[in-house]
Image: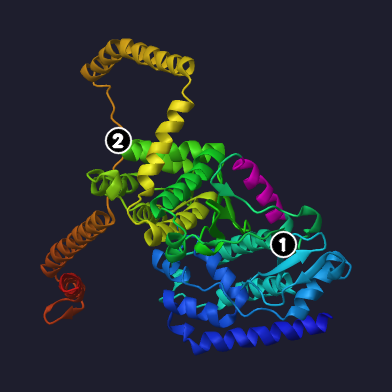
Amino acid sequence: MEEKAKMDNRSRTKEIRQVLFRNHITRGVTPEKLRIILEELGPTYIKIGQIMSLHSDILPRAYCDELVKLNSDVAPMPFSEVEEVINRSYREDWHQVFASIDPEPLGSASIAQVHRARLLTGEDVVVKVQRKGIYDTMARDIGLLHRVVRLMPSVGGIKNVVDLGMILDEMWTVAQEEMDFLKEAANIEEFTRNNYGIVYVRVPRLYREHTTSRVLVMEYVGGCAINDREHLLSRGYDLNEVGRKFVNNYIKQVMDDGFFHADPHPGNVKVHDGKIVWIDMGMMGRLSARDKALMERAVRAIAVSDISSLESTILELCETKGKVDEGRLYRELRTLIERYGKMSLGNIDIIDFFMQVLEIMKENGLKLPHGMTMLARGLNHMQGVLTEISPEINMVEIAAARIRENAIEHLDLKKEVKRGGKKLYTAAYKTVEIPPLLKSVLEEYLKGQAQVNMKLDTTREMTDLLRRLVRNIVMGLWVMALLIGSSIICTTDMRPRLLGIPALGFFGFMMAFVICLYIFIRHWLTRNK
């Protein structure tokens, strides 16, 4: 068994190496080249690429945009393997549970495929079946990818920008969760509870008694994809109403529940019998109460152009890698807010704005919590659906209205009055302290005991300029010292002599000449860069 695993590893390593060499990986990894490599390596790597596309806060935006194009539809596994997985999972023949299973899949993705079926009790259902051996295959491929990353050249590629080993570890964690259908079943149940009572939302019924870690059974729901304009219009649907309800429910998931669908593409959202139907809960995002509060604070800071509050919120929300240049972060946020501050809410492109914020975070060594990266993916899919069915709807306006409603609904007057009184007392107390503090400062100044501590943050260009200036001054002093010293030596009878002057003085003049020549050549080269 162990020998077979080693042979499989060698075979797969050889296949990976051939794909990498065929795509000239030694010349660097461009976004398009990375997508092509993942597609050629098969379903496991396609799923890895889809998870990588979540990391707009880590990967360069060009890579994320390209990886979003990865097609999740892959060749279906034979029905005999589907039967084998179900039988092994149930530990009995599938005919003991299902009256029939359609051999033709409704859809086939990298981790699982879906078949329509009928239970012995007569209900129409869909059966989601995990690909045979996918867990072992992905575990092996992740291990091999770690080896490839260590061998990947740094020049001209993605390895210069991010820690690929860290991303692989996180991807494996996400993939493991998605491969556990019991986890997805729990997601369906929680999502159903959160949306109970919303008349225009429907979640297919879960058949928990027939669900295992590798087989998931839920109610079959007809209808059409939410972006199927022709079908919706032929059935008399108002596309703007569908779009508004779609956005409203999604914002409710994010702002109220903190538990939202992270993959709301048209294949996972349908419209049936006047309701929006959410399916496939394998990839869900979660925001803590703290994350939600900070996100609302950030939205308010953007609304009133409070850059200081926005900066402090981002620093509190994100994980930092090393020391953050807060001056640079403030300047970049100010530029972004100035660009969007004059626009009306209806004219703001939420995806473009969000991506620019992520770019600023990445440039400043800030990493978003996992839930926020999932939200970025979800918003991207949402915007794509709206563009197709109702392009005039703007998510920012609906989100702002939702935040205002929440603020009014959850307003606690007693708490707000208490908080306001506390702030007023603090301000009054500190105001009273100002005159004695000012008196102390003036007395110290008059006695010559005042001290001022300053911290100066300079740009890289200014730092380089100062370094060159100091270096040239020091070299100039060396030249002056050599010339004066050599001139004094030349007035003596010191021996040995070269060209009629003391040899030591001669060498001093030569050293001064070489230093001057070096300064001139360096200046000329720098000027012509």
- Mark in the foreground, 1 or 2: 1
Q: What kind of element bears circle 2? A: loop
Q: Quadrant of the C terminus?
A: bottom left
Bounds of the magenta segment: 183-196
Residue toward you, 48 or 313? 48
The magenta stretch spans residue 194? yes
Circle on res. 499: none
**Does 287 sit left or right of 60 as displayed?**
right
Question: In percent of the image, x 72 and y 62: which residue is there?
Answer: 124
The reply to whether the C-beta atoms of the residues labelled 1 and 2 are less than 8 Å apart is: no
Question: What residue did someone put label 2 on?
Answer: 304
- Residue 272 magenta: no
Which residue in the protein does label 1 denote?
A: 124
Residue 89 drawn at (x, y percent): 82, 66
CA–CA distance in space, label 1 to label 2:
52 Å
Q: Which corner quadrant of the image does residue 493 belong to?
A: bottom left
Observer-nearest residue: 505 or 203? 203
**423 relative position to 134: left or right:** left
What x and y, as percent, mark residue 480? 15, 62
Identify which amino acid the numbered label 2 is placed on. Answer: Val
**Label 1 is placed on what type of residue?**
Asp
Q: Identify the image quadrant of residue 210.
A: bottom right
Q: Secondary structure at mark 1?
A: strand
Residue 150 appears anywhere in the view = no
Residue appearing at x 28%, y 22% in the figure: 449
Depicted 179 relative to depicted 143: above or below: above
Visible residue check, residue 198: yes
In the rendered image, the quadrant that contains the N terminus is bottom right
Mark positioned earlier in the residue sequence (1 or 2): 1
How packed mark 2 is, by other alpha carbons closer than 10 Å (few <14, some 14-19, many 20 or more), is: few
